[in-house]
Amino acid sequence: CLQKVDTFLHRSIGTNVVAAQSEATRKDESDEKEKDGRKSLYVVQAERQEQAEKSVLISCNSRTNEKKFLKHLSRHGDIKKHFFYESYGMYAVVEFVNQESVASLLEEAAIPSVSHESMVPFKSRLLSLRNVGSVASPNQQPGQQCQPQTTIPINELIQRLSREESIDQQITSLTEAYQLTEENSRLRFLVCSLLKDIAAAYFPECNIKPFGSSVNGFGKLGCDLDMFLDLDGISGRNIKMPKSGLCLEYQMKRANSERAVTQSILSVIGECVDQFGPGCAGVHKILNARCPLVRFAHQPSGFQCDLTTNNRVAMKSTELLYLYGELDPRVRCLVFTVRCWARAHGVTSSIPGAWITNFSLTVMVLFFLQRRSSPIIPTLDHLRDLAGPADKSVIEGNDCTFVSDFSKIQLHSNTETLEQLLCGFFEFYAAFPFSMKSINIRKGKEQNKPEVAPLHIQNPFENSLNVSKNVNATQLDRFVALCQESTWLLQKSETNTPTPTPWGLASLLLPSQVAGIKSRKKRRREPASERIKSLLESLKNKNEQKTS
Ligand code: GTP
Ligand code: MG
């Protein structure tokens, strides 16, 4: 099973987070690291960004003839890759071999002529395909295959898992169904690149990089797109003043604090996105949050976007999560499974509130993996001790240093199966002394709680902060009760042959039977028994279809 996991491990992508050190040094090191078969975050991110720069996003018709479309575009140069997807209409992502082709294509594109509306004359790489003077015949077949950009519905997933032969296979299958595809990753980088073109009107040397689950290896199709406006190309490349003699420096506007600068930059860029950004809608500036951000929907991709700047610690967390996910294929599988289980039971939610977040949940899985009698992943302190000079990173006084060279990390031998680990996860948290102890992946050991909070998970880089400060006692109790129930369900699940009845992991995703636990979702939906009944019915029908 581990081998199978390995085959799709490298399909996911990651971002690199560079704090103080020069990008050139990191690139040299990354070239070295590629030799051990695993691409470093820096290399993968650089590749993805380059692809994005050479790509355009085109709204087209579902009847568009693929051949004709490609022939039309290839007048500007060779096309390296293309794919179609649907999101409120049909779209195509087209990557050219050379960047000049994009310039040539844009040169030829027309400005829309509409008589009753006015438009902002901002040109971008988001275009529309027009078929002037021709009418599509109504019975024409769709011209191309679409790449899915969302996950399959939970009931379909449960059916798929029920047909697997072991819990290990179920976990692998869930990860395969949920993880970001190659195409979805490309689209995420392309949206960042399109946004960068807007921000570059003010800051030509800026970069916009994805972070969070879009790139940390734990992203599920449909997850939000966290973006980081990186201005280090301007301020990070500061030329040293000579010891004596004349020199010039820029005059710059001053503000009272770093936070005030962040707020004013995001306010202006947010305004540009709102007023000029094609396809960007519902822009909200959330500038008073602990981490100021601009939230909007990018309609052509269907992504919910969060744009931040000066958010280097979050970039570092992304890099750390990516590293842990790459160390052992079981890490990603377990995180995907626990995240899916938590979402199915309303332990996590897309609405901000007292729920456990996906980030906290991921840290809990990592901690559990550090606590095995033969640990599957090392502690953050150990990763810091292995760091080389180029890995040194101090952000706002916090030591964010850890090794980036995979080959320096020696792992313990641990042969536990995914099934054993999933059972172990539920058992571990079903009995965890939450009232007294804090979860700490830096030390890899529970610590005494430094403050009163139902759930205390130490922020890996800002040690005085609790990443689960928002979680209330009710939500923690639900989590613990569900862990207890899942332990029990897995223990009694002995069957080893695929059956139409949800079993193993599939049974864990069904509505909870735990007495007294009310899921917010459950109250709005039909009763659990009804859902199970309809699910069994559809499984039965499928089985009958197969055998007939
Ligand atoms: P989903 O969006 O839910 O799929 O997961 P995500 O990992 O992207 O989480 P989210 O969008 O909430 O946050 C984006 C990134 O910001 C995370 O991956 C972390 O790197 C970072 N982050 C989020 N919450 C916290 C927090 O409480 N503390 C710290 N240090 N970093 C956080
Ligand atoms: Mg996110």
Image: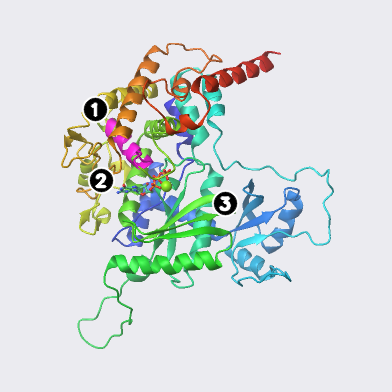
- Whether residue 236 is visible here, answered yes or no, is no
Numbered badge on residue 448: none
Judging depth in this view, the residue of 322 and 534 nearest the camera is 534
Mark 2 sits near ligand 1, with its Cβ under 8 Å away: yes
Write the start and end of the magenta stretch as one range: 354-368
Determine the secondary structure under disc 2.
loop
**Horizontal relation, residue 127 to residue 19: left or right:** right
Observer-side mark, 1 or 3, equals 1
Which residue is pictured at 64% across the width and 19% down the height? 542
**Horizontal relation, residue 62 to residue 244: left or right:** right
Q: Is residue 547 magenta?
A: no
Judging depth in this view, the residue of 488 and 44 nearest the camera is 488
Q: For mark 3, what is the residue? A: 301
Residue 123 in which image quadrant: bottom right
Q: For mark 2, what is the residue? A: 459
Residue 277 in which image quadrant: bottom right
Query: In whole angstroms, how far apart are the C-alphas of marks 1 and 2?
Result: 19 Å
Numbered badge on residue 432: 1
The quadrant the N terminus occupies is top left
- Whether residue 46 is visible here, answered yes or no, is yes
x and y, in percent, of residue 462 in the image: 23, 50
